[in-house]
């Protein structure tokens, strides 16, 4: 196998500095790495990862390698790979196949190269590795025990596979763990999307109308942060219960076709295609700003926009202006891909510390239990969530109460 395919291995020193920075702000992973160096729980285990190739995920790779894993890693988004970080991982001896702005052919080839060592465990971000193992390269799935998926989009794909009876191995729904979605999706996405909007536009959030499509945990986080920055927030939803929650949280709720006429900034966070369609864009204010917080670049209908725009130009770094037939234009951040990682540094290190701790312990769970697991989407155990939460609290120097024996007996009894 080719040891690596990166843009330039000489970029490694810059990548090492980035990884070192996040390492000091990820105490959970650091403590797990310390344990792994002693215990080597993944000794002889082959792991393939498709991840956003940046500093925090690079440190995740290093922690798994410290545990003895035979690793192969690639990117999960053509814009999120940071070439210096990919070079640093390769320089540290890990097989890496990732290049920023890879072509579709290069991206797909890198995914397949990542699987060539026939992994026992796959760690996926969006479901691309799992799809290849079930379609183009099923022979590489022969040795797969199971894996982990950390995105809403990926889990939607996995559950569809399970429903169709085609899932070949168990996959742990890392995204659904409390220590993941309650923090990563809400606080991580909320902060990193707003950070991306501010950094890429150099515009103020306060006083603007921000339209958030979807009121799941990502949408809640974005709405919460936009509101805290002084924006007027509108939520669009298809779920009546979530729409009620949004109303009771103090936001306006309306269909996208109406929100399109009044919004200044639009953020999609649904995991569904054409959340912001051409009919919506044609109703928007001139120079409205569009950003996507979902995994794939289909939430904003980029295909229709590319086809129907009269012209386009680079309005600013990471922002493309599309000029429409009605004389107006819309500005799209990061080509309609994940705005916080395709046009930014992604979630804060402390947040990914939680998410990647769930990833590591879930991968360990697959390794230890794969012989008795069914080929289904599996929930993260409450034990893993609690273990991670206690370790995180300890890293903050935070203590909490503990039930007395009398309280435990009271809570476990049906008699008063």
Image: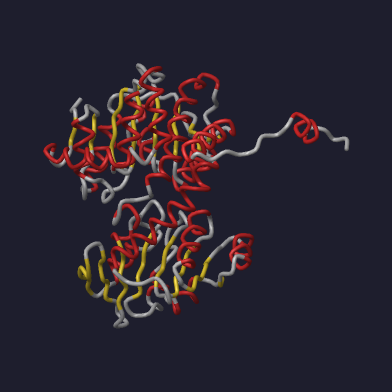
Residue 205 percent coordinates (x, y):
39, 71
Apparent side of residue 392 relative to residue 344 in the rendered image (left or right): right
Residue 160 percent coordinates (x, y):
51, 43
Q: Nearer the viewer, residue 12 or 287?
A: 12
The residue located at (36%, 22%) in the rendering is 67
**332 w.r.t. 128: above or below:** below
Residue 138 percent coordinates (x, y):
36, 29
Based on the displayed image, in which of its 4 quarters is residue 407 positioned?
top right
- Image mark count: 0
Residue 261 percent coordinates (x, y):
44, 79
Instruction: Find the residue positioned furthest to the bottom.
Output: 327
Q: Quadrant of the N terminus?
A: top left
The residue located at (80%, 34%) in the rendering is 410
**147 w.r.t. 202: above or below:** above
Based on the displayed image, in which of its 4 quarters is residue 274 positioned?
bottom left
The residue located at (39%, 77%) in the rendering is 284
The residue located at (56%, 62%) in the rendering is 238
**64 w.r.t. 266: above or below:** above
Instruction: Find the residue positioned furthest to the right.
Output: 416
**282 w.r.t. 62: above or below:** below
Apparent side of residue 179 relative to residue 206 in the rendered image (left or right): right
Q: Quadrant of the C terminus?
A: top right
- Coloring scheme used: secondary structure
Q: Nearer the viewer, residue 130 or 313?
A: 313
């Amino acid at each position: 196998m080719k040891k690596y395919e990166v843009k330039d291995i000489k970029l490694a020193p810059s990548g090492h500095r980035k990884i070192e920075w996040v390492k000091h702000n990820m105490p959970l992973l650091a403590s797990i790495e310390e344990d792994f160096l002693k215990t080597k729980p993944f000794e002889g285990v082959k792991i393939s990862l498709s991840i956003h190739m940046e500093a925090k995920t690079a440190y995740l790779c290093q922690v798994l390698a410290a545990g003895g894993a035979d690793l192969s890693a690639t990117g999960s988004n053509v814009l999120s790979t940071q070439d210096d970080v990919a070079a640093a991982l390769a320089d540290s001896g890990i097989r890496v196949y990732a290049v920023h702005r890879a072509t579709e052919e290069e991206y797909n080839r890198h995914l397949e190269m990542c699987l060539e060592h026939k992994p026992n465990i796959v760690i996926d971000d969006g479901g691309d590795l799992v799809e290849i193992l079930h379609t183009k390269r099923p022979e590489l799935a022969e040795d797969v025990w199971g894996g982990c998926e950390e995105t809403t989009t990926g889990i939607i794909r996995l559950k569809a596979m399970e429903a169709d009876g085609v899932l070949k191995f168990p996959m742990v729904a890392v995204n659904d763990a409390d220590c993941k979605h309650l923090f990563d999706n809400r606080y991580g996405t909320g902060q990193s999307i707003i950070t991306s909007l501010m950094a890429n536009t150099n515009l103020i959030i306060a006083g603007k109308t921000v339209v958030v499509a979807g009121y799941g945990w990502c949408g809640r986080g974005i709405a919460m942060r936009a509101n805290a920055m002084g924006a007027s927030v509108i939520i669009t939803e298809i779920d009546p219960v979530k729409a009620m929650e949004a109303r009771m949280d103090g936001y306006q709720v309306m269909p996208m076709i109406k929100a399109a006429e009044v919004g200044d900034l639009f953020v999609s966070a649904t995991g569904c295609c054409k959340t912001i369609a051409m009919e919506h864009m044609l109703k928007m204010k001139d120079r409205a700003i569009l950003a996507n917080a979902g995994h794939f670049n289909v939430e904003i209908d980029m295909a229709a926009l590319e086809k129907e725009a009269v012209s386009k130009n680079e309005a600013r770094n990471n922002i493309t202006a599309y000029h429409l037939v009605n004389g107006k234009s819309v500005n799209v951040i990061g080509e309609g891909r994940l705005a916080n990682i395709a046009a930014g540094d992604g979630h804060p290190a402390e947040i990914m510390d939680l998410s990647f701790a769930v990833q590591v312990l879930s991968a360990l769970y697959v390794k230890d239990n794969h012989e008795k697991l069914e080929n289904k989407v599996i929930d993260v155990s409450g034990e893993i969530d609690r273990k991670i939460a206690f370790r995180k609290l300890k890293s903050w120097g935070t203590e909490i109460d503990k039930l007395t024996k009398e309280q435990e007996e009271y809570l476990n009894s049906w008699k008063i």
